[in-house]
Amino acid sequence: MNKILEKRQLSQNVFYMKFEAADIAKNRKAGQFLIVQIDTELGERIPLTIADADAAAGWIAIVFQAVGASTYKLSKLNAGDYLGGVLGPLGTPSVIEKYDAPVVCVGGGIGTAPLYPIVQALKAAGNRVNVIIAARSKDLLIFVDEMKAVADEVVIMTDDGSAGEKGVATIPLEKYCQQEVPPAEVIAIGPPIMMKFACATTEKYKVKTTVSLNTIMIDGTGMCGGCRVSVGGQTKFVCVDGPDFDGHQVDWNNMMTRMKSFREQEAEADHRCNLEIQAGRLVELQKN
């Protein structure tokens, strides 16, 4: 049982949760993920990338979006509650190198959270790290202060211009690629469409680009096959071969098509979740 130490809401339906997990905190590396279960008997296995950790204090932090029945239930837990089970660290760690040129890290929406440990590791290795954080609006930006505390430069982009500059992440990314000293590597984590266009931008300048495909994972062990993607013409399993891959080799259209495979089941789960929410509200109204 893993005791929840802290839970707070970062933006609409996005939550930060810190809990006890001493062994994972000691052994995790940047880019790895874990599996969370609310109930070990019947609970769904939820793969979530580690957003932060403290080996000395023995805690792990995750950031998740309440988009279905299981993540909604997870969002209802609070400090002092316990998680039924946590398994990790899993996945292949991010490759962290020391470069002579800057590294640019691009975080889109909730993808900014799993990018944070990678930025920390790159800085610890002695790199100059520039970070681009993009979201639809100011209210959906996360981990801005955390990134500013560790990165050399942070550029904020919002679709509606409510914070930072108006526009998408590829605008400042292209500017970095056009500099006299282009990035040694670009690392992008976020919605698949954002990563796809980030890779299209860097490919023009022949800049090495790494992406994390954690959004397609289902059970987190490779047994279900739901996370298979085509990378360089070969079939890969994100949860065991990744989640990091060469972004220029990913078949983005195939991946985005595969992500629609379980829409009927997700819609049914969302419907049940909404019924539970409505029932909960009715109980609260009756109490009052």
Image (spheres, helix red, strand yellow):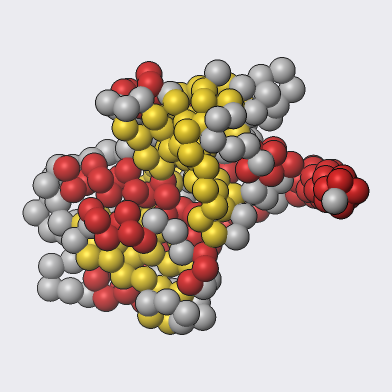
Q: Position of residue 175 (x, y in %)?
A: 27, 76
Front residue of this view, candidates 232 and 274: 274
Q: Residue drawn 27% across and 49% down?
A: 119
Q: Quadrant of residue 157?
A: bottom left
Which of the pair 20/110 is nearer the observer? Answer: 20
Left or right? Give the position of 201 relative to 72.
left
What is the number of callouts on the image?
0
Which residue lies most toward the front here? 288
What percent of the width, then of the height, locates residue 76? 66, 41
Task: Give the quarter of the image for residue 186.
Answer: bottom left
Q: Residue at x 31, y 23 (%)?
A: 26
Residue at 21% of width from left, 46% of height from top? 122
The image shows residue 274 at horizontal and vertical percentages of 82, 50
Residue appearing at x 30%, y 45% in the figure: 118
Q: Quadrant of the N terminus?
A: top right
In this rendering, position of residue 10 left or right of residue 184: right
Q: Is residue 109 visible?
A: yes
* Residue 256 position in % (x across, y down): 60, 54
- Position of residue 71 relative to residue 1, above or below, is below
The vertical placement of 21 against 248, above or below, is: above
Which residue ends up furthest to the left in the rendered image? 100
Can the viewer see residue 195 in this picture?
no
Q: Residue 181 lies in what quarter of the image?
A: bottom left
Q: Is residue 239 left or right of residue 208?
A: right
Residue 219 shown left or right of residue 269 in the figure: left
